[in-house]
Image (spheres, rainbow, N blue to C red):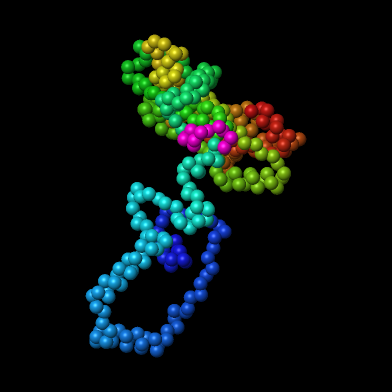
Amino acid sequence: MWNPITNRVHNTRDIIWLKRMYFKPQDVANEDEVDVDEIIVEQEQITGQVNGTETVTSEESIDSEERSIESEEESPMPITTMRAERTVQPPSRLIEEMGGMKITNQVAGIGAGIGGGFENTNELRVMTYQEVMNTQERDKWIKAVEEEHDRMIKNKVWKPVDRDSVPKDANIIDSTWVMKKKSNGTYRARMNARRFKQVEGQHFDGTSLAAPVTNDASIRIMFTQMLMAGWTAYIVDVKGAFLNGDFEDGEKIYMEIPKGFENYHAGNIVLLLLQTLYGLKQAAMAFWKELLLAMKMIGFKRSEADPCIYFRWSKKNGLVVWLSWINDCLYIGNIHEVKITKMQC
């Protein structure tokens, strides 16, 4: 990056471009036009220095070096060496532009916490089960854990079995918690299976590791069509999406009792999963297959151009299009037909 004030080039990875900042081009003389007289004068000066007409003593050379070092130290933009794990400081020009305020992670996270009653932005980050249980809001987190257990029971995700009935060659996986307080003050506790404990061939098939999603081109085309036709669009986030998938290949996955659920399952008990769970490698693909069945049941057809575009024609209200990105869905069409589709889902 060129700094016209110090006439220096700075190599840095800490740059924020401000669109309103610009530098006027400076008039640069044509380098091709060379004055012959100037060349002759320079040659005479060089010759005089060699012949001893102009000599520089050692003391003068030392003074010149000291002056050059002092000028570098007084420069407002010091040279930054590119080294790993160095402390990145905001450029001085950016600090002046921001009114002297230094940008930190705390400042960057304030916007998400406005109105949420947070004491500091650390509460916005994802925390572990042990961390939340050591906070002053322990009771609220315990309630969030209980709500997560109720959701698992409602969706019939597992059934308790005696540990002695588990095959000896079965690998029992365990789980972890993702705890986060949202900006609206909601306490979210989500239990996830540890997918790295899964064994290929026993817990999952290698072809079911990922689910297809719609692409950017399809989204842009549908938004353009929506504007041209005057349609309406809704965004839907499927709640508990990964708890609705089935194990089509007959996988039997056993899981240890998660932390916080010990009071519900006493004794020598493990959990046999009946539905997919957040964190499992095949959860996304299993949900996508369930979504295909649901689209077919309400009369939607899948596009041949994009496997995550589904459409339905209505004689009265025309076309309705549904796009899916894992558990985030977008449906576009005539407002009356869109409302009907929304009620069906």
Image quarter in which the C terminus is found: top right
- Residue 13 location, x and y as percent? 42, 54
Q: How many marks?
A: 0
- Residue 16 location, x and y as percent? 49, 54
Tell me if I can see residue 41 in this picture: yes
* Front position in the image: 260 or 118: 118
- Residue 320 location, x and y as percent? 67, 37
* Front position in the image: 278 or 50: 50
Q: Is residue 137 above or below residue 163?
A: below
- Residue 49 location, x and y as percent? 27, 84
Quadrant of the rendered image containing residue 160: top left
In the image, residue 124 lies in the stretch drawn in magenta: yes
Q: Residue at x 35, y 85 (%)?
A: 42
Quadrant of the rendered image containing residue 296: top right
Q: Residue at x 72, y 37 (%)?
A: 335
Tell me if I can see residue 315 in this picture: no
* Front position in the image: 298 or 182: 182
In the image, residue 123 lies in the stretch drawn in magenta: yes
* Front position in the image: 55 or 186: 55
* Residue numbers of the magenta segment: 114-125
Q: Residue at x 36, y 87 (%)?
A: 41
Q: Residue at x 49, y 37 (%)?
A: 121
Image quarter in which the N terminus is found: bottom left
Quadrant of the rendered image containing residue 12: bottom left
Q: Is residue 149 left or right of residue 236?
A: left
